[in-house]
Image (cartoon, grey):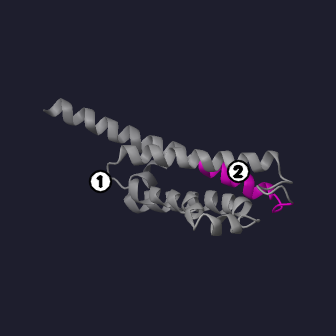
Amino acid sequence: MKRLWGHDLGRVSLVFILTTFLVLESSRLFLFSDAIMFVVFTLGLYLFLFTLPYVGTYIVRKEKRYPSILLGAILLVSLHLFMIAYAGLNPHLNELGRDSQILIPCLHVLAILSGAVLIVLYAVKLWEIRETDKQKEKDY
């Protein structure tokens, strides 16, 4: 894992794959059920909730230093995890109170695990930024 995390292409690929699992499950449960009218009524702003986690593929590169955006990514992934866990607790209702998508346990667990790993990876990146800042302060 450390070898994969050491290369930019490995970081970006890992975060992209994990984000795709997370967004696919949350969009399957909350976007493709009956929420398409909600997307129309909000003029597409609801779609940003499902596209913004892909910003993480850009900010985990080694030379990028955006701690505030990383914190936002952690909060956004946490929101997706909450949405998926809520759908797991209430699998028979969607946001309109009607029957929703069928809950597939394997995909559900995979999405929750990928979200948890994403939070850990973003925390590692924040720790790296903090450590390099400490090292720069020592050097001056």
Q: Percent from the top left, x then y, of residue 21?
A: 63, 60
Segment tinted magenta in the rendering: 99-115
Callout 1 secondary element:
loop
Q: Tell me the distance, in whole angstroms, between the alpha carbons under discs 1 and 2.
A: 32 Å
Residue at the outermost front position: 41
Number of the label disc, if any, that sits on residue 84: 2
Q: Is residue 116 visible?
A: no
Q: Amino acid at mark 1?
A: Glu
Specify the principal SS of the magenta part.
Answer: helix
Image quadrant where one finds the C terminus: top left
Q: Percent from the top left, x then y, of residue 5?
A: 43, 52
The residue beneath circle 1 is 63
Q: Percent from the top left, x then y, of residue 77?
A: 56, 49
Q: Residue at x 54, y 61 (%)?
A: 48
> Where is 137 relative to 63, above or below?
above
1 or 2: tag closer to the N-terminus:
1
Q: Residue at x 15, y 33 (%)?
A: 139
Q: Viewed as shown, does residue 83 lie left or right of 48?
A: right
